[in-house]
Image: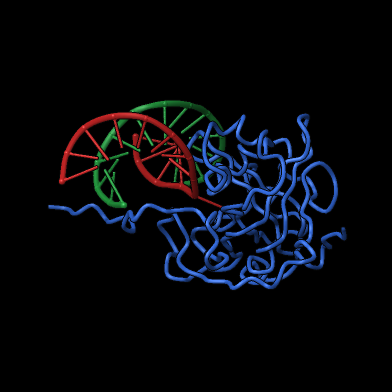
Chain colours: A blue, B green, C red
Amino acid sequence: MGRVTRAQLSGPSEEVARRLLGMRLVHDGSDGRCGGRIVETEAYLAEGDEASHSFRGRTARNASMFLAPGHAYIYLIYGMHLCFNVVTGPPGVGEAVLVRALEPLTGLDAMRARRGDVGDRDLCNGPGKLVQALGFDRAFDGATLLNGQLRLLPPLGDARAPVIRSGPRVGITKSIARPLRYWIDGNACVSRVSKRRAPLQRRKR
DNA sequence: GCAGGGATTTTCT
DNA sequence: GAAAATCCCTGCG
């Protein structure tokens, strides 16, 4: 079975974001184990990254992002959805990786009970969707991911190193230049982002 | 298939 | 008071 170590989750978030691809995220909840393989991530940096929640320093909301590598940072977005991050920076620094999509592996019936009658690939193909599918919430904000009910597990033994592609991060309006989004090439569960243009500045006239 | 808009609430300016 | 690391439904082609 094996386990994920803190060292594997430590380092520049661009690097850990790639390393997380292929690892598994599982939640042992009241209805059994739900989990899947991480197929899409985004890095958020501590330096010079205006899109990172840590950019303007530590607040009550983002405090978990400043914990040691291997902790969870979970926050509410758009008033409705939760996003799940893996902290990667040293304590006090504020770097993390957003997990954007999973390939469901375990507990698909329980996932579907929470997500509705959708196809397998639509269960976890988005940051809000995967949190809903696995059935966890902000109670795990600040919790360790190395053991416990919500945890990371190594790639399956027969998994080959994935082919990784990268591109611009999704849904942000600042620091959009760098390709800090990473996904497993060809995987059907990578989130489909509508071809919505990068937000245009509303034209003044 | 694609574009547009609504839901909903916390957070910071 | 506005923006936010989103998702889903509708209308239209």
Q: Position of residue A201 (x, y in %)?
A: 27, 56
Q: Position of residue A141 (x, y in %)?
A: 71, 42
Q: Residue extending furthest left?
A: A205
Q: B10 or A141: nearer the eye?
A: A141
Q: Position of residue A77 (x, y in %)?
A: 52, 41
Q: A87 or B11: nearer the eye?
A: A87
Q: Which residue lies at the image location 37% right of the left edge and 52% below the top edge?
A: A194
Q: A68 or A194: nearer the eye?
A: A194
Q: Examine the rendered structure and indicate whether residue A84 appears above or below residue A8.
A: above
Left or right of residue A65, residue A174 in this image: left
Q: In the picture, residue A164 is in which quadrant?
A: bottom right
Q: In the picture, residue A10 is in which quadrant?
A: bottom right
Q: Position of residue A79 (x, y in %)?
A: 50, 34
Left or right of residue A140, residue A186 in this image: left
Count of labels in the image: 0
Q: A169 or A104: nearer the eye?
A: A104
Q: Quarter holding the N terminus of chain A?
A: bottom right
Q: Which residue lies at the image location 45% right of the left edge and 57% below the top edge?
A: A170
Left or right of residue A81, residue A170 in this image: left
Q: In the picture, residue A11 is in which quadrant?
A: bottom right
Q: Residue extending furthest right?
A: A2
Q: Which residue lies at the image location 64% right of the left edge and 67% below the top edge?
A: A13
